[in-house]
Amino acid sequence: MTSTTPAGQMIPAAPLDCTGKYCIIGAGSSGLTAAKNLKEHGIAYDIFEREDGIGGNWYYGRPNSSVYRSIHLISSKPLTEYTDFPMPADYPDYPSHEQVLAYFQAYARQFEIERDIQLTTEVTRVEPVEDGRLWDVTVRRTGGLGGADGADGAGGSETETRRYRGVIICNGHNWYPKIPEYSGVFTGQTLHSSEYKTPDALEGRRALVVGAGNSGCDIAAESATHAAKTFLSTRRGYWYMPKYFFGRPVDQVGERLLRLGVPLSIRRLIGRVTYGLAVGDLSRYGVKKPDHKLFETHPIVNAQLPYYIAHGSVIPKPDIARLDGDGVVFTDGTREPIDLIVYATGFRIVFPFMDTAHLSWQRGYPSFYLNVFSPQYDNLFIVGLIQPDSGQWGLEDWQAQAVARFIVARERAPRKAKRFAARKRAGQEHFGGRIKYKESTRHHVEVEHYSYRRRLQQAVRELEM
C-alpha cells in the first residue's frame, strides 16, 4: 500500500506491525503441521495460501498442483500420516488424491487451524530487517486484504507489507518444472508431468514419456492403455519395486527390517531377492539394468510398469540424442515418430519471493541444518524441504515440532537454544544413513527416512522444556 504527497509522489506505507507473530508461507502438508505445532505451543502466526483452498500439491486441478487424476500415494498409510492424526481405517493402503485432500481438511478442522488460513493470498516478497531480527513479508490477495486500502491495479488484487518476528517457509518443492534441453526442434506437443491431468491427452497418440520417477512410471503405465504407442526414455536403469511383498505394503516390510536393526548389506540382499521374485530381469525386454546399488536412488514403487513392458505396451528407450521435427532420435541411433512428449523430469527448488542470499544457497538449493534451520538466522525455517524414501508428512510433523520448541527455547531456555543454534550453523548434512545417493538434482534433499526421523526426534528432545 502507498499514499501520495500533495505533489503526487508515492510514499510507501509503513509495514503492518505483526511482530508478535510468525509468518507461515503455504497451507499444504508442511504448512498445516507448522501451524498446528505453533498453535500447540502458544506461538501466534499468520498462514498464507495462494490457492483458494488448502492441500498444496494435493489440491487437484489448481494451477500450482502437480498431481494427476489417477494418482495414489506410493508410501503406505502408517508411514505417511502425521504423528498424532492417523488416516481413517477405511482408507486403502495407498490413498487417492481425493482421500489425501479430505485427510488434510480433517486435520485442519481437528486442530482448529482452518480459520487461521488466509486463502487466495500469495507471498510475493520476504526480506530481513534489523539484521534479520524481524522480517518484512509482502502479500498480494485477489479480492482485497480485509480492510486494506491500497490496490496494485493487477486484476483487482491488493498488496500489503507486514512485519513479523520470523518466517516459516512451507511452499513445497514439487511445483516448478524442470525440463531438459536437447538439440533440434520438436514439432509435436510437449507437456511436463505437472501439466498432465487425465489420459485424454494420450488417446490415440504416439507418446514418449521422458524420465522414470514415480510420476513418469505412472503416466507411462496409463499411456499403455490409452496411447496408440508408448515409449519410455531413461538415462539409466532403475529398480522398479512392487507395492506389495508377502501381502504387505513393501515399505512396511522395509520398516520392520530397519526397526530390527538389519544391516544395510542384508537389507539390500533381501531387496534384491524381493525384486527377483516379484519383477525379475527386465533387461530381456530392453530395459537397462540398474547402474547402482539398491537404495542409491529415490525408490520407484510401481507394479504396473513391468507388466506393461513385458506385454510390449511400453517400449523402453535410452536417453534422447536430439529432437527431430515430428520425431525423436535416441542415443542408440533409433528414431521414432512421436506426437506427444511428456517430460517427467522433476522439479527445481525455488523460492521466488526471496533472495537466495538469505537462504544459505549452495549448489542450487538451501543448506539448512536438518534441512530445517537456517545457519544464518535464528527465526527463519523451512518445513518440507525433503525427498524421503518413504512417507513425508510424519517427518514434516517432527520438523515442525523441532521448530516450535526452538522458538520457545529462545525465550524460556536461552542457553539451551544457544547450544542448538551453535550446532545449526554447520548447515546441511548427509541424511542417507550409510547410503550414498547417485549425483542428481532429485537427490539434493533426499533423506533416508528412518535415520533422519531419529535425528529430528533427538532435536525435539534436546529442545524440550
Image (cartoon, rainbow, N blue to C red):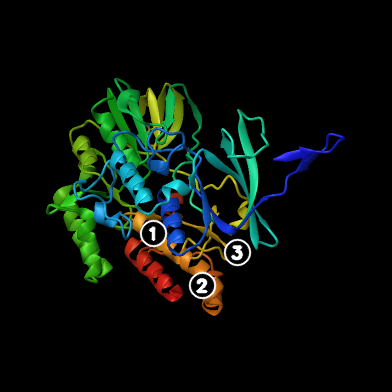
Horizontal side, residue 391 vs residue 414: left or right: left
Residue at the outermost bottom position: 415
- Determine whether the residue tagged by mark 3 lies in a helix, strand or loop: loop
- Under mark 2, the amino acid is Ala
Residue at the image position 63 percent from the left and 30 percent from the top: 154
Q: Quadrant of the N terminus?
A: top right
Residue 137's place in the image compared with 381, above or below, is above
Horizontal side, residue 131 vs residue 263: left or right: right
Residue behind mark 3 = 377
Mark 3 surroundings: few (<14), some (14-19) or many (≥20) residues within 10 A: some
Residue behind mark 2 = 409
Residue 20 is situated, as x and y percent measured from the top left of the image, at 59, 60
The answer to which of 214 and 175 lies nearer the viewer is: 175
The answer to which of 455 and 290 lies nearer the viewer is: 455
The answer to which of 229 and 103 lies nearer the viewer is: 103
Task: Answer with mark 3 or mark 2, whichever residue precedes in sequence.
Answer: 3
Mark 2 surroundings: few (<14), some (14-19) or many (≥20) residues within 10 A: some
The answer to which of 296 and 374 lies nearer the viewer is: 374
User: How far apart, in angstroms, are the residues tagged by discs 3 and 1?
Assistant: 21 Å
- Determine whether the residue tagged by mark 2 lies in a helix, strand or loop: helix
- Under mark 1, the amino acid is Asp
Residue 110 is situated, as x and y percent measured from the top left of the image, at 34, 52
- Determine whether the residue tagged by mark 1 lies in a helix, strand or loop: helix
* Disc 2 + disc 1, Cβ < 8 Å: no
